[in-house]
Every structure is written in C-alpha cells, then in structure tokens.
C-alpha cells in the first residue's frame, strides 16, 4: 500500500495525473477484497492488480477513460468467465471506484 | 490537488499512525463531490478538513469504527448524515479505508532456518528485521531481502524494535535459553503473532520456566509453538514455508485446512456467499 501511494506522489511530482482504481465493495465469491488498489498511468503502464483477467481489462479501460475525460467513476464489474461464455466461475461482482490523483496546481 | 494528500498518506503509513482514508465515491450533494478525499486521524482531525456539519460528524464516527475494526466500509448517507439505501436520492456514498502500515516480521535468530523464512516473507511483502548476537550470521550478505539486520545482543536489539499490532515475531534462536529470554521480553507486547520453534518438549521447558518467572499464562498460551502449519515439513525450506503459512493464516483469519471438492460441493456456501 505504501508503495502505491509513494508512486502516486512520485508521478504527481513529475506533473502526471494518476488513476487509482479501488475495489470498494464485493458480492459473491471474488478473488480480491474491498480496499484493493491498482494504479494506471498516463503512459499506459500500471501498478498493482485488482484480480486479473476480465475484471482487470474492464477496470483498465475505465481508468483510461477517466484519465482522458478527467472524471472519477463508480461501476460494477461482473466476474463472468470468458471461457465458458455464459458461465460464472468466480460468481461475484465487484464495485470499483476509479479516481484521479492530480499534481498540485492542477485545478482541472 | 491530491499530490499533497498522497504525501500525507505516505507519512501516515511510514509513521504507522492510525488513520482512515475517506473517499466520496458517489454524491448528490455539491459540498461532498465524488472524488473528495481526506485523511481522518484517530483523534478525529481530518486533513484536509471536510465541510462542518452532521454528515461530516457521521463520517468521523464511522471512520473511528473502521479504524477500531480494521475493516473497510462503504456507507451511503443522506445529506443530514443518516444512513440510507445506496440508491436513495441525494445519497452521499463514502468509502472508508483504514491505512494499514506495512506488516513487519522480526526474526529472532539468524541461523539456517532464518534464511528461507526471510526470503519467503520478503516475497509476501513483509518488511523483515533479522537479529542475532553473532555477526557472522546476522549480516546483510546473508539476508539481502531484509530491511534491517541487527548483530547485537538479543535483549538490547529487541528492546529497540517497536512491536505493534502489525508486527509478527518468529523465535528461532540457536538455544532455548535465548528463545526463553526473548519470549519473556515480548510475550505481553502487542505483536499480532509470536511463533517459536522447537520440539514440544523444548517448548514446554520454556513455558514452565516463564510461568515461574511470572509471565502471565494467558500471554504464553497465545504463542504458536511449535511454530508452523502442520504440512509435514522436513527441510528447513519446508519449515519456513509452514511458518509463513501460519503467519498468513493469522493475518487473514484463515482456517488453514486443505480442501477437496467433495468436502464443499453441495454445501450452501458453494452457492456463493458474501464475505464482506
């Protein structure tokens, strides 16, 4: 956790905005619990994980949108299984908040 | 302007100060926009300060509770600070996240078992301190993954390490007299976990000696000894794995058993339950 915030501070100091995705709630069986963070940077790289696979792809896309339009967002991700299509291996839903951590002096 | 807040969060984590990160994740109230964040300290001080009023007081109260239970909370409030359904009109949804400092592992004794314990603990994200009174064992070359390696007498070294509720201690010295002295020193500390190596016979000798020395029985009964989850370990690496599995089991409140499909298939829990 300390590493993540250190990286936010470091990137902010370089003038970069960082998107932080946080699992804020979960229902059903989920691989990662509330309080799990993942960072997505303006250069397309990231740090941490919110569970991998299909969840991560959805969260990554929303984080990229947030960096592009400057708005935080709250959304649900269903943990359906890509392999089985209709299937539902994890069986749960996570609620994710994507927020922007901005450099000082950036009023946007 | 969250750069300053990121620094504040880092300070809190580094100084191991109890605090909660408060984040508004959805809102129908202009004074509490989505994305509003603050670090709320145990004493109630919020940095940056939130708008004065009943809603902030409700957040303050629930943050204190999140801190004492060490659990995240996601709560929906009315503008007046009453708890409401998440879809209620004008609800302010707030995520409360206790800022947990990095877990520390203190390995007392730098012998052959300490090496794989340190390696596995580092992989698991622990900040590791190793101590021993022999500098040919307690040195950075032998423990490259450790944050601190202290070569000095056990009592003095141990006294210099603040042991809080995010600290785990493993006693693996070369002689039960050293384990005994170290355990006497930390048995009543706030340590989240104390594990001690040894045969049951050796453990019992230490236990009885410490009872005679006046160490409270209740404190000694909590000690994990002989340390490690029972996975039939034989090699030092396997014993280290068993010890760290036990540490994780304590940290996560696990049940430390091995599941076969037949043991859970068809049970209500397999239909999916909400652990939160």
Image (cartoon, coloured by chain):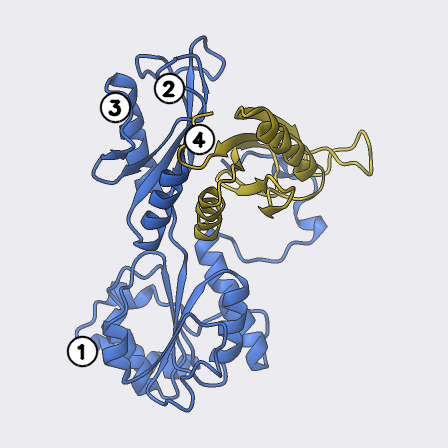
Residue tagged 3: B57
Q: Find the distance from the CA under tag 3 to the CA under tag 4.
A: 29 Å
State which mark lies toward you, 3 or 4: 4
Q: Find the distance from the CA under tag 2 to the CA under tag 1.
A: 57 Å
State which mark lies toward you, 4 or 2: 4
Residue tagged 4: A106
Q: Find the distance from the CA under tag 1 to the CA under tag 4.
A: 62 Å
Q: What is the number of the mark on residue B32?
A: 2
Task: Give the residue drawn at x 65%, y 36%.
Answer: A60
* Mark 3 or mark 1: whose residue is earlier in sequence: 3
State which mark lies toward you, 2 or 1: 2
Q: Position of residue B78 (x, y in %)?
A: 36, 13
Chain letter of disc 2?
B
The colour chain A appears in is yellow
The colour chain B appears in is blue
Disc 4 and disc 2 on one polypeptide chain: no
Chain letter of disc 3?
B
Query: As drawn, is A18 to the left or to the right of A68?
Result: left
Q: Nearer the viewer, residue A103 or B192?
A: A103
Q: Find the distance from the CA under tag 3 to the CA under tag 1.
A: 48 Å
Disc 3 and disc 1 on one polypeptide chain: yes
How many other residues sit within 10 Å of disc 2, few (<14), some (14-19) or many (≥20)? many
Disc 1 and disc 4 on one polypeptide chain: no
Q: Find the distance from the CA under tag 4 to the CA under tag 2.
A: 19 Å
Query: As drawn, is A104 to the left or to the right of B55?
Result: right
Q: What is the number of the mark on residue B81?
A: none
């Amino acid at each position: 956790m300390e590493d993540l915030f250190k990286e936010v501070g470091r990137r902010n100091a370089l003038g970069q905005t960082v998107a932080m995705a946080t699992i804020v709630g979960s229902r059903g069986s989920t691989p990662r619990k509330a309080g799990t963070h993942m960072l997505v940077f303006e250069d397309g790289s990231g740090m941490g994980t919110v569970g991998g696979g299909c969840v991560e792809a959805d969260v990554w896309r929303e984080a990229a949108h947030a960096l592009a339009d400057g708005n935080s967002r709250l959304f649900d991700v269903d943990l359906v299984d890509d392999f089985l299509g209709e299937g539902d291996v994890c069986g749960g839903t996570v609620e994710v908040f994507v927020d922007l951590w901005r450099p000082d002096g950036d009023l946007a | 302007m969250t750069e300053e807040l990121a620094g504040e969060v880092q300070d809190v984590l580094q100084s191991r100060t109890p605090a909660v990160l408060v984040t508004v994740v959805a809102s129908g109230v202009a004074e509490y926009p989505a994305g509003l964040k603050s670090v709320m300290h145990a004493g109630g001080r919020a940095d940056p300060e939130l708008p004065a009023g009943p809603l902030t007081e409700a957040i303050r109260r629930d943050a204190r509770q999140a801190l004492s239970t060490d659990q995240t909370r996601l709560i929906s409030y009315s503008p007046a600070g009453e708890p409401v359904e998440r879809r209620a009109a004008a609800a302010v949804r707030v995520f409360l996240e206790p800022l947990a400092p990095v877990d520390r592992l203190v390995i007392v004794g730098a012998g052959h078992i300490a090496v794989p314990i340190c390696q596995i603990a580092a992989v698991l994200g622990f900040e590791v301190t190793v101590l021993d009174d022999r500098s040919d064992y307690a040195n950075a070359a032998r423990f490259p993954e450790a944050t601190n390696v202290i070569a000095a007498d056990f009592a003095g070294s141990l006294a210099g390490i603040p042991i809080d509720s995010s600290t785990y201690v493993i006693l693996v010295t070369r002689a039960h007299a050293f384990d005994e002295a170290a355990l006497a020193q930390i048995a009543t500390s706030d340590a989240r976990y104390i594990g001690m190596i040894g045969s049951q016979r050796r453990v019992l000798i230490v236990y009885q000696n410490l009872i005679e020395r006046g160490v409270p029985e209740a404190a000694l009964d909590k000690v994990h000894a002989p340390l490690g989850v029972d996975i039939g370990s034989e090699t030092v690496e396997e014993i280290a794995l068993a010890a760290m599995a036990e540490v994780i089991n304590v940290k996560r409140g696990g049940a430390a058993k091995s599941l076969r499909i037949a043991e859970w298939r068809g049970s209500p829990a397999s239909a999916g339950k909400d652990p939160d």
